[in-house]
Amino acid sequence: MLRRRQGTLLLAGFLVAATLAGGLGTGHGTAGAQETSADTVTTELQPGWNLAGWTEDEAEVSAIFEAIPQLDAVYTWDAFRQRFSGAFHEDFGQANSLTALTPGMGLFLYLGGTETVEWTRPLNPRSGATTLRPGWNLVTWAGPDGIAADEALEVLGDVVVETQGIDSDALTTLRTGSAFWLHASSLKEWWQLDTLPVAIFGSSVPEHRLGPLTREVDSVVTYFGRQLGVGVPELRINFGHDCAACSQYVNRAIFLNNVCFDSLPYEYVHALQDELRRRNGRENDEPDWLAVGSAAYWSERYDAWRAFQSYETRLHHTVIPVAREATLPLERFWSEGSVRTPRTHALSHLAVDWLVNHAGEEALFNFYGQERPAAWPSRFEAVFGLSVSDFYETFESYRREAAPPIYRINGAFVDAWAKPLPAVEIAIHSPDGEVVARAGGLSGPTTFDIEVPEGSYLLSFHVGTCHAGWYGQHGLVVDSQERAEPVKSSLRGTDLRAQFTRLCSSIQGVIRDTDGSNIAGVEAEAFSATSGRSAAKAVSDEAGSFSLDVRDGSYLLSFSRDGEPLGWFAGWTVVAPSLAVKLVPDRGDATPFVVDRDDLGDVLRAIGLEVLLPATRIAIDGTISDSAGNPVPGAQVSAHSVDGKGLAFGTSDSDGTFTLEARQGAYVLGVRVETCERRWYHDTEGTTPSLEDATVINPAIDSTAGIEIRLPEPPADGGCPQ
């Protein structure tokens, strides 16, 4: 007997696999008359194949075999992949591809035996939320019982291509809890239990937005129908409404101005709250934070679902940072009406998130769905399991850890005439001097706003590398830390005004030698002429440039290289065609360099210097001989850059020796005898006619003394060597 039933089920599997080819019905049996109440639905199942819907809460697939002992197999249809998945009675020992049943799932049932079966099960309103996908869909009807199919499907418009029942018959009437086949032309979200909202578009809404916004309405309504099992009948949604608020819900109407279409889920939750109050005969007596927080919680859940993102990630990245800026305890939001700000809005959301984690989402729904018209504190304690006062105390403790309030130090930089100053860097110091935060800089704004722990701090300011002072009494920037005024961080911010009466200048310059070559690696340092302390230090770069950022004042400037002093600034000297820095060896002879700013229009002013140092020379010496080793007097010897530019010239003496004095650098040597072409020194061949083949002499690594240049043997006819 078992073997015969297995064969029947295998045949059933083939029939199911073939249902979509040339007709959806199997011709075996059909679900008969149905009875429904507000809470249950009964379907009469015939032996053989039946179509019916799962209208209960989500359950494992074993639940339907327990409810219907005569059931041999159950199939459902994956509209996304356009294929079946199934499960079988445990007697058959076959693997199941269907493991769970969800509200609204359409089912293809195979009953054994010869008896009809009445299947009574709960009617979960969430069964009325359906997502139709392009192609065939196996749909559960959870709407009004006995409604004409054409009337029920009218809201779908052109999305419906074709519908069929169990025997491929056209649908005429839909019974609650039944299932049917629907071929859809496109994706469509469908909420079956209430009249769908009417979308009204203002003249300012672009035409290309109408379709997407209509689909968004369907998506929002169906999502919350699936999550909460409730909708809002006779709702009007006004897009592009010229209202003062960004968005608003009032008496079964949602108003969204042109920049706030994204607020639709949030306002729709307010509409759901109002609908549940209406159904249960209650006034709006709950605190504002709970109504707003619930709407924020559910709308954030929807946005995370739409964006395929984690709700927890969005909570931590977008909600908690804003909630930290709220200053009042949650309990005071209701009495003081302060919830309508982004900060308190976010904190209200966080409070509802805590309630959901404590008691579950169902409790949040039940708070609004309770039938008894008790006062809100009683309803609150009944569904969430703690009193209102206990909640406030517990939440504030949680809040201090999860979203501690943000203490801030903020303000503006201004000059002596209270005009904004940019490019100032601020450092926040703890009482022991440690820098805990920085902001601003050379490209920074004229204001600062820094998050710091609660406490008292000292503020210092820099412009570039110049220390511009400390925040002092009455906001004046002072010279020393001893005169600095402590500043306490605040939840609301400090709104300081740091006023600078003295700013900074950049003493910039270039260091060259008397030959005009830039010199890198020279250290320039500015010392206060009054205290003698170092105020700024810099090293010249490859271009010879340096920059010392100092405050207005008088300074002694020193220059050194490789630890060896080069001199002190002592005024100016004429080096045609301009002025250059005059250097003296002793600090006592130095002339103070005065930085005195009358104009504070710029935060950092550049003062240019040109420092000329004696050019460093090197000696190149050697001998010139002929092919027999005899000295060659009167030969023209020259040092050239590697590209052939002549830099130093000389003539060999009677004993063939020569000496050249040239700047530091890499060189090649040229030799010319009488009217012959110049030849170039080569360390192994003596000389070469080609500049490219010449030996390069680098004084940094090569010796420049005792260079031997041997000329080639001249031709027999006495001409020049080739």
Image (cartoon, grey):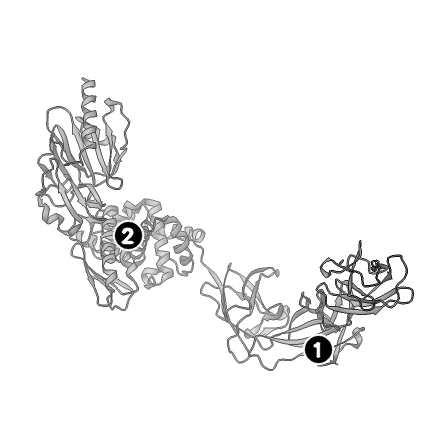
Q: Nearer the viewer, mark 1 or mark 2?
A: 1
Percent coordinates x, y for residue 478 in the rendering: 61, 73
Quadrant of the snapshot with the N terminus: top left
Q: Nearer the viewer, residue 693 or 169?
A: 693
Percent coordinates x, y for residue 443 in the rendering: 53, 68
The amino acid beneath tag 1 is Phe
Q: From where the camera sits, is residue 371 visible?
A: no
Q: Is residue 82 left or right of residue 636?
A: left
Q: Is residue 149 above or below residue 569?
A: above
**Within-10-Å neighbours for mark 1: few <14, some 14–19, many 20+:** some
CB within 8 Å, label 1 to label 2: no
Tell me how many marks there are: 2
The CA distance from mark 1 to mark 2 is 76 Å
Q: Residue furthest front?
A: 717
Q: Quadrant of residue 460?
A: bottom right
Q: Is residue 517 left or right of residue 27?
A: right
**Within-10-Å neighbours for mark 2: few <14, some 14–19, many 20+:** some
Quadrant of the snapshot with the C terminus: bottom right
Q: Is residue 552 left or right of residue 284?
A: right
The amino acid beneath tag 2 is Pro
Give the residue at mark 2: 377
Q: Earlier in the sequence, mark 1 or mark 2?
A: 2
Judged from the image, the secondary structure of the residue bearing numbered disc 2 is helix
Q: Is residue 401 left or right of residue 340?
A: right
Percent coordinates x, y for residue 650 in the rendering: 83, 69
Q: Nearer the viewer, residue 607 or 494?
A: 607
Q: Is residue 471 above or below residue 577?
A: above
Give the residue at mark 1: 593
Percent coordinates x, y for residue 717 in the rendering: 83, 62
